Amino acid sequence: STPFLVRSTSQLLSRSLSAVVLKPPETLTDEGLSILAAPRPLTSLIPSRSFQTSAISRDIDTAAKFIGAGAATVGVAGSGAGIGTVFGSLIIGYARNPSLKQQLFSYAILGFAL
């Protein structure tokens, strides 16, 4: 694809240059000016192919989405279990020794953050 692009670009440039150099100024037509004034983008020189995905590729994408959703669910459940454990420990600690309420609460906040 790169040699084709180089060859097409050099042909376009030589055609544009010959339109200016070889023609006398009085015979320079609008066609010659249009080549110089509005050059075509290089992407127009590359032959285009339509992009199609196969059924296997779509199945792999769908499976990857389901695996990702399952991993996210497990992650949320794990963090929920961790928060529940910290909160449960706070309640148990407060029930055993109510005078440590402030210190237990500080540790619980630290546990929620971690």
Image (cartoon, rainbow, N blue to C red):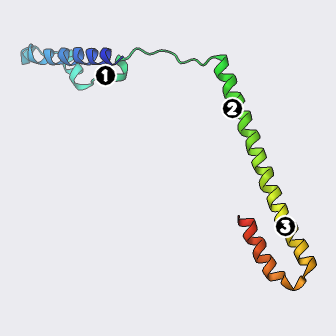
Q: Would residue 22 be found to the left or right of residue 76 on screen?
A: left
Q: Residue 38, percent across and down?
A: 27, 25
Give the residue drawn at x 19%, y 14%: 15
Q: CA distance from mark 1 to mark 2?
A: 41 Å
Residue position for label 2:
64
The answer to which quarter of the image holds residue 59 is top right
The amino acid type of the residue labelled 2 equals Ala
The amino acid marked with disc number 3 is Phe
**Residue 80 or residue 32, whichever sits in front:** 80
Q: Quadrant of the N terminus?
A: top left
Closer to the eye: label 3 or 1? 3
Please, what secondary structure does the residue beneath circle 1 have? Answer: loop
**Quarter of the figure with residue 101:** bottom right
Q: From the viewer's perspective, is the residue at label 1 or at label 2 nearer?
A: 2
**10 Å crowding of disc 3: few (<14), some (14-19), many (20+):** some
Residue at the spot x=30%, y=16% of the render? 3
Per the image, the residue denoted by label 3 is 87
Say what amino acid the circle numbered 1 marks.
Arg
Q: Earlier in the sequence, mark 3 or mark 2?
A: 2
The numbered disc on residue 40 is 1
Cα distance in 3D space between marks 3 and 1: 67 Å
Label 3: which secondary element: helix
